[in-house]
Amino acid sequence: MDMVTLDYFREPGPHSTAKKNKVGLAGAPTDIADLATWIQGRMLHEHWASRYGEELTPERRELSQRRSVDAVLDGVLAGGNSPRPAAGRAVGVCSHFSLLAVSALRAHGRAARSRCGFGTYFAPDKAIDHWVVEVWNGDRWRMVDFQIDDFQRAELGLVFDTLDLPSGEFLLAAQAWQLCRRGEDDPNRFGIFDEGGFWFIASNMIRDLASLNKIEMLPWDDWGAMPSPDTEISTEELRRFDHLAEVLLDPDRHWEELRLLYGAPGFGMPGEVFNAVRQVRETVSVAQ
């Protein structure tokens, strides 16, 4: 592995840098299992809340709109730096679990990166929009799902190690794209709720590209070349996404091109996005 690449992922990006909550983040462990326990005892997934017996108020749901780790840590540390029952946890979604993990690991000099794609272990008939983390363990990138705690593991009937995901359990957006382009899977299976299709997979590839450039975004942030559900992707656009998929599947080998692609029209996050949950355009700062 190129040390330049590893050094890049050891340093935090604009959204994974803790400033006012630097001390609180420094208290997080660096051991993968311990870090997962630390996060899971302080974060509650918005869409799992009711299964923990929690009915979220609009104010608590709004916590899922936070983009920076400092903002996430405001909620995580509000009840003190200790684990707590679901009623006292900060609220977020899968990307917040990943952002918190990546931020903690980078704060301690460990190479880590958030990846956007689809979890195959949430529903039998759909690959669900999801975020995980790749952590460099000395000889390979170890794929870790920091969201899945013992309760979720039991609810989902999982028998594999979510802290070292086996191949095929989580599909990178680029893997899903190639499978569907070859006709080996149904693009409508990839998405969330009643949404799915090539447009959804392509959008996740762009979010993954941003994340590999250390701009970790919300799962519902839309910009640039992300297709809309009601438009047909042109042949030229399909070829462009085909190329993007090749690069995303081996980012270490395509390191320079990964950076160049993020600067290409429509791929880089322009500083303003359409928040598909709030249905408004929002300015997003990338200043550190």
Image (cartoon, rainbow, N blue to C red):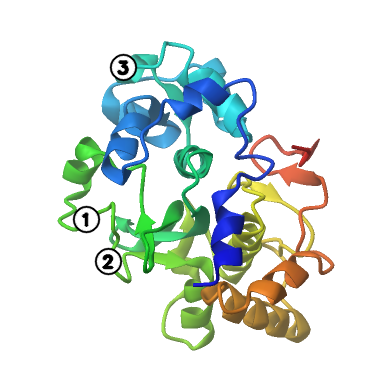
Provide residue 39's location: percent of width, then percent of height. 37, 32
Q: Secondary structure at mark 3?
A: loop
Q: Residue at x 70, y 85 (%)?
A: 239
User: For the residues marked 1 and 2, what is the alpha-carbon distance in whole angstroms?
Assistant: 7 Å
Q: Specify the amino acid type for callout 3.
A: Arg
User: For the residues marked 2 and 3, what is the alpha-carbon distance in whole angstroms?
Assistant: 30 Å
The answer to whether residue 261 of the structure is visible from this angle is yes
Residue contact between numbered discs 1 and 2, judged by CB atoms under 8 Å = yes
**In the rendered image, which residue does mark 3 sit on?**
84
**In the rendered image, which residue does mark 2 sit on?**
166
Left/right placement of residue 68 relative to residue 187 reads right
**In the rendered image, which residue does mark 1 sit on?**
161
Q: Residue at x 45, y 76 (%)?
A: 186
Residue positioned most to the bottom: 182
The crowding category of the residue bearing disc 1, from other C-alpha atoms within 10 Å (few below 14, some 14 to 19, many at least 20), is few
Q: Specify the amino acid type for callout 2.
A: Pro
